[in-house]
Amino acid sequence: MSATPAPASTLLNIERTKTVGTAAESQIVTEDVAEVSPADHRAPEDRNPGHTGQRPVERVVVLAGGLSHERDVSLRSGRRVADALRGAGIEVAVHDVDASLLPFLAQEQPDVVWPLLHGASGEDGSIRDVLELLSLDYVGTGPRASRAAWNKPIAKNVVLGAGLSTPDYVTLPQSLFRELGAQPVLDAVVGRLGLPLVVKPTRGGSALGVTLVRRAEDLPRAMVDCFSYGDIALIERAVEGTEIAVSVVDGPNGPEALPAVEIVTDGTYDYDARYNPGRTSYYAPARLAPDVASRVEDMAVRAHLALGLRDLSRSDLIVDTEGQPHFLEVNVAPGMTETSLFPQAVQAAGRDLGDLYRAIVTSSAARQSTSR
């Protein structure tokens, strides 16, 4: 489904919305989000000029691997996308992110690069900065908006500014616990947000370092696990309900939501549950009432627009017992493995993966070529 674009001021005025966290994070909000070009809020036909007069794409380089904790997932995603594009008649090379990459790109000069890197450097905008320095067309969100989406508190601030619901939260750096003492800070967190809580790194994916905390005595251990993946923690009020993922793709008439995917697992939806078959059941489309399904799709499209995302994204939501969706986080480089949510949504929509991926690379190449 499509949605009315968010006001152009949503990103540029984010510093006026509720900011919870450190002074450093507030500075990041102003720096990264304010740099997102208002052009990201142009009419759909201007955001995606590649849908008219598209030039053929013959060769694509998929970037997969990297050195983040999500390297294995990235490699699996890269292989799956490469196979689908080859089946659609496009020549594809898969390359890791290492010292040989830039010489390889300079020699090959691909029509499009598709960054399928998860975690730092892949989703924080840095590899996209490099691709722009090299004047290479690539799939996905630009570097500045990627940085905003990658940082969970910033993304939550943006969607709050766009009028979307997200669980109440605080962000706390590891250094604060050393300065003030851990227990008084944790007591204040529980006193303010209550229980249960979700603890997660402010940056990262695949549920690495994420813990659902139901008892106050388990919170210190959750903080230790979180800080093993990053030095700033996001602690948010846990919402009991149905976990939902909604993927969005840019179409000729603007962003469109694919059918929501419902996630049911035998415990926490952690890394093992996400990528190893057996522990998790998926329902695509999700088992939601029609009006609730419409609301979650609308929320994902509005988040995509508010954050200035391009080509594709996946929003993770939770629907509470009253049917109200809440935004949790967004992914600018969603997983594409055999158990990943984005390809499941594509199949639930009755679309062919290879055809959709070919349309995405063709549109991104045409869009970025005409912008130079």
Image: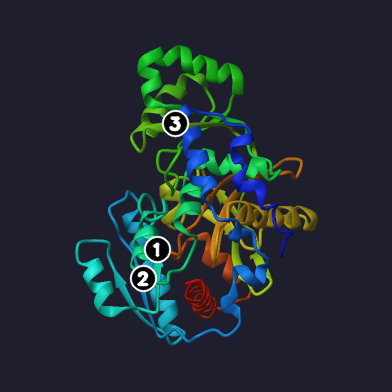
Give yes or no for contact between labels 1 and 3 (Cβ–Cβ under 8 Å).
no
> Could you say where residue 293 lies in the image, as x and y percent from the top left?
73, 56
User: Which label is found at residue 288?
Assistant: none
Identify the residue at horizontal 47%, vertical 52% (top origin). Answer: 144
Q: Residues within 10 Å of mark 2 (few under 14, many from 20)?
A: many
| Secondary element at tag 3 | helix
Q: Residues within 10 Å of mark 1 (few under 14, many from 20)?
A: many
Q: Amino acid at mark 2?
A: Val
Q: Residue furthest left?
A: 99
Marks 1 and 3, how far apart at CA: 29 Å
Marks 1 and 2, how far apart at CA: 7 Å
Comparing labels 3 and 2, the label whose residue is closer to the camera = 3
Q: Nearer the viewer, residue 158 or 232?
A: 158
| Secondary element at tag 1 | loop
Q: Is residue 118 visible?
A: yes
> Could you say where residue 182 lies in the image, as x and y percent from the top left?
41, 16
Label 2, on which residue? Answer: 62
Corner quadrant of residue 163: top right
Q: Is residue 279 visible?
A: no
Give yes or no for contact between labels 1 and 2 (Cβ–Cβ under 8 Å).
yes
> Could you say where residue 53 lies in the image, as x and y percent from the top left?
57, 85
Name the quadrant of the N terminus: bottom right
Marks 3 and 2, how far apart at CA: 34 Å
Corner quadrant of residue 49: bottom right
Q: Mark 3 or mark 2, which has the lower sequence index?
A: 3
Q: Is residue 90 left or right of residue 213?
A: left
| Secondary element at tag 2 | strand
Q: Amino acid at mark 3?
A: Ala
Q: Nearer the viewer, residue 145 or 319?
A: 145
Label 1, on which residue? Answer: 116
> Could you say where residue 183 lies in the image, as x and y percent from the top left?
44, 13
